[in-house]
């Protein structure tokens, strides 16, 4: 019996151990999270300061830190579930002293009052035989949750880097628009002075003076709004980087590089989106849960055994006569549970149907999101090209007016108006340039963080 129990304990301690090491090792293996930043993609924008900010984002952002912690939490949940597949070994020893103060009768036999010690030091082992594979399925289901959380973490990285970069380029745009606005204000001041002089000499009415002054207040108002937007963007970027103060270094607008991305993509591009992968994993998990619910209807079998010492006197504790050993198999089966298990099975089936419909919905919505992003890129590119062409035309007009002034065919006021028109076109060009960049970031986000510059143009 003792040899059998020792062999039993050794057997159940090594059961599943071969693959348990691999499973735990696979969970403890962490990918290099900085790869989620996709630095290779962002380098296509030709901005070293942006790359530096993204690296700081990886180190400082609290949302990313929370995402990493959540992933570790799910990893430990898998470990907890996996522990149910393994044998349980425990030491359940106890020492007591019994006091019997009255005579006890056992038929014709009488046992007088007594007091005695009881020393029991057993090593207990148990193992649920996973005949139906139920515990293995539970671990697989828990692993799907872990994989889903990995995709959720990846979603946070893609979303944060995209939002940060969009705000970063918007801040560069706001800087440039403020410079242009200052120029417009200075030009408008000159126009107001010249119009006032014309009014004083009787060459124009007071209405023209008031109209130009009114326009000047509008320019100041636009500047105030731009300054407010600039401060809000700076605060947003500091929040991303977990900074309480300091200056956000950024590139000058004139140094921005424009690289065009593909405008036709294949539908299978959504297969790399984290939400698509997560919906697939959730569907797989729901399938496991249905199988688990079915196996809950079957009986369980538990191997148990004890080996140790049992003595009424401490001096006899280590004698061969005090050795304790027992072993057996416990079958358990719920004959009646009030319909709980059948209700649980139906619940899991409904959840599987829900996961299936969610998966199909995700496909439709992902395709729609990518389509919308592609349309946005196409429109932004057209507007970018049209705005630049319009800016070039307005510059030619400005040059012609200056040339006419040199030969006396136009006035200084005409030159100011022409320069003002050129600045208006410049504002539109700046806005459309950054809008195109942001549209590419939106497309990057909709494709699940893929490097757009490495994709081939295909019909979506």
Image (tube, grey):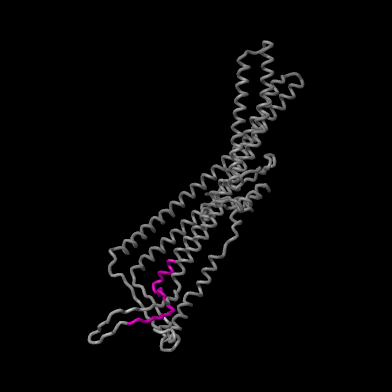
Total number of numbered labels? Answer: 0
Identity of the residue furthest to the right in this view? 407
Quarter in which the N terminus is drawn: bottom left
Left or right of 66: which side holds 411?
A: right
Whole-percent x and y of residue 64? 56, 53
Magenta part of the chain: 114-138
Q: x, y (%) of residue 386?
A: 62, 35
Q: Residue furthest left?
A: 108
Where is residue 131? Give x, y as percent: 39, 74
The residue nearer to you, when weighing 367 against 207, is 207
Q: Position of residue 13 (x, y in %)?
A: 47, 77
Q: Is residue 238 left or right of residue 309?
A: right
Farthest top residue? 202
Q: Nearer the viewer, residue 40 or 258?
A: 40
Q: Is residue 320 above or below residue 64?
A: below
Judge whether 60 appears above or below 12 on screen: above
């Amino acid at each position: 019996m003792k040899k059998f129990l020792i062999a039993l304990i050794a057997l159940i301690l090594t059961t599943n151990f071969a693959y348990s090491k691999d499973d735990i090792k696979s969970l403890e293996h962490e990918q290099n999270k900085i790869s989620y930043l996709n630095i290779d993609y962002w380098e296509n924008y030709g901005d070293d300061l942006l790359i530096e900010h993204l690296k700081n984002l990886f180190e400082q952002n609290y949302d990313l830190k929370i995402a990493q912690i959540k992933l570790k939490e799910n990893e430990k949940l898998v470990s907890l579930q996996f522990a149910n597949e393994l044998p349980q070994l425990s030491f359940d020893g106890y020492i007591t002293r019994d006091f019997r103060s009255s005579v006890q009768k056992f038929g014709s036999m009488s046992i007088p009052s007594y007091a005695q010690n009881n020393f029991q030091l057993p090593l207990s082992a148990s193992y649920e035989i996973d005949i139906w594979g139920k515990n293995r399925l539970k671990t697989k289901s828990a692993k799907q949750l872990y994989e889903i959380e990995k995709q959720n973490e990846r979603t946070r990285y893609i979303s944060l880097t995209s939002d940060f970069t969009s705000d970063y380029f918007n801040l560069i745009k706001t800087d440039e628009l403020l410079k242009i606005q200052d120029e417009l204000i200075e030009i408008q001041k000159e126009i107001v002075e010249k119009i006032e002089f014309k009014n004083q000499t009787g060459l124009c009415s007071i209405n023209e003076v008031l109209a130009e002054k009114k326009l000047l207040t509008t320019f100041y108002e636009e500047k105030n709004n731009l300054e407010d937007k600039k401060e809000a963007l700076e605060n947003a970027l500091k929040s991303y980087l977990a900074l309480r103060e300091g200056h956000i270094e950024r590139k000058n607008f004139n140094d921005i590089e424009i690289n065009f991305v593909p405008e036709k993509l294949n539908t299978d591009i959504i297969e790399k989106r984290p939400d698509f992968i997560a919906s697939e994993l959730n569907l797989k998990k729901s399938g496991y849960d249905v199988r688990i619910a079915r196996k809950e209807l079957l009986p369980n079998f538990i191997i148990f055994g004890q080996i140790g010492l049992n003595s009424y006197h401490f001096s006899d504790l280590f004698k061969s006569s005090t050795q304790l050993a027992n072993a057996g198999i416990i079958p358990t089966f719920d004959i009646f549970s009030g319909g709980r298990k059948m209700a649980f099975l139906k619940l899991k089936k409904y959840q599987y149907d829900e996961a299936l419909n969610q998966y199909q919905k995700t496909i439709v919505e992902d395709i729609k999101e990518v389509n919308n992003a592609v349309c946005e890129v196409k429109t932004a590119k057209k507007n970018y090209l049209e705005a630049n062409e319009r800016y070039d035309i307005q510059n030619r007009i400005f040059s012609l007016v200056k040339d006419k002034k040199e030969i006396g065919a136009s006035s200084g006021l005409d030159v100011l108006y022409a320069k003002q028109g050129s600045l208006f076109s410049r504002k539109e060009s700046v806005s459309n340039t950054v809008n195109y960049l942001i549209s590419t970031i939106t497309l990057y986000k909709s494709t699940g963080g893929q490097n757009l510059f490495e994709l081939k143009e295909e019909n979506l």
